[in-house]
Amino acid sequence: MGIISEILGQIALFCISAISSMGYLGIGFLMILESMIFPIPSELVMPFAGFLIAEGKMTFFWVVFSSIIGSLIGSLLSYYIGFKGGKKFLVKYGKYFLLNEEHLAKTEKWFSKKGELTIFIGRFIPIVRHFISIPAGFGRMNLKRFILYTAIGAGIWNSFLMYVGFVLGNNWESISHYSDYLSWGVLIILIILGIYFVIKRLNKKSRKYKKHR
């Protein structure tokens, strides 16, 4: 945990510097990065913004507005990456990850039926929210619905973190200590699910091979 805390400390300094020098634009910029694959946790950005509100240096409306716009821009960029590059990636590198066009079809089906819930819930989960927009684009989720549920989910989550920072005041950074454990927990779950998926695929291929012998 010491290394993670040290890294988060450096990221926190970067976030403080960006917001202090660019104001609302800094919040928007950081949330663009947070909504992509960059390791900028909203648990550091928004509580600090809440602290600045408590100090009278920022306002609730513009903090929330700039954070939602930033989250939308970052999410749309990730969506575009998945939308344009998903199939090319699958054809070229899919075999190395045990993926094929059948999985592309399943992803498209999933996001056509449960995309709204997936995107909405994904905004509240550390690590997941950095990547969730890519499979949404990969799965060709309806763009209007993607924008709507991204905005709603990001708005709720960002506002919550901002309010926590507003209440904690000078202790706004303490929220990151709890997010460390949550992030590791989610990461471990994702790794376990990934291993389960790989084993399942290997067993399926093994059964097909034995059947055709």
Image: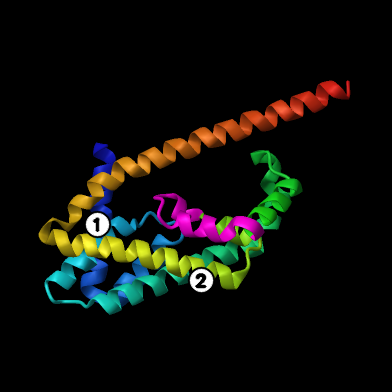
Q: Residues within 10 Å of mark 2 (few under 14, many from 20)?
A: some
Residues 139 and 209: in front is 139
Secondary structure of the residue carrying numbered label 1: helix
- In this picture, residue 61 sits left or right of residue 85: left
Q: In the image, what residue occupies the spot 63% across and 63% down? A: 141
Q: Is residue 110 above or below residue 208?
A: below
- The Cα–Cα distance between marks 1 and 2, rounded to whole angstroms, is 29 Å
Q: In the image, what residue occupies the spot 70% across and 50% down? A: 106
In the picture of the structure, the residue carrying the numbered disc 1 is: 12
Q: Is residue 113 above or below residue 94?
A: below
Quarter of the image where the N terminus is located: top left
Q: Earlier in the sequence, mark 1 or mark 2?
A: 1
What x and y, as percent, mark residue 166? 18, 65
Residue 68 seen in render? yes
**Amino acid type of the residue tagged 2 in the rendering:** Leu
Q: In the image, what residue occupies the spot 70% across and 47% down? A: 103
What x and y, as percent, mark residue 142? 63, 68
Residues 157 and 17: in front is 157
Residues 109 and 26: in front is 109
Residue 23 seen in render? no
How many numbered marks, from 0 up?
A: 2
What x and y, as percent, mark residue 90? 69, 50
Residues 112 and 40: in front is 112
In the picture of the structure, the residue carrying the numbered disc 2 is: 148
**Amino acid type of the residue tagged 1 in the rendering:** Ala
Secondary structure of the residue carrying numbered label 2: helix
In the image, which residues are magenta? 112-131
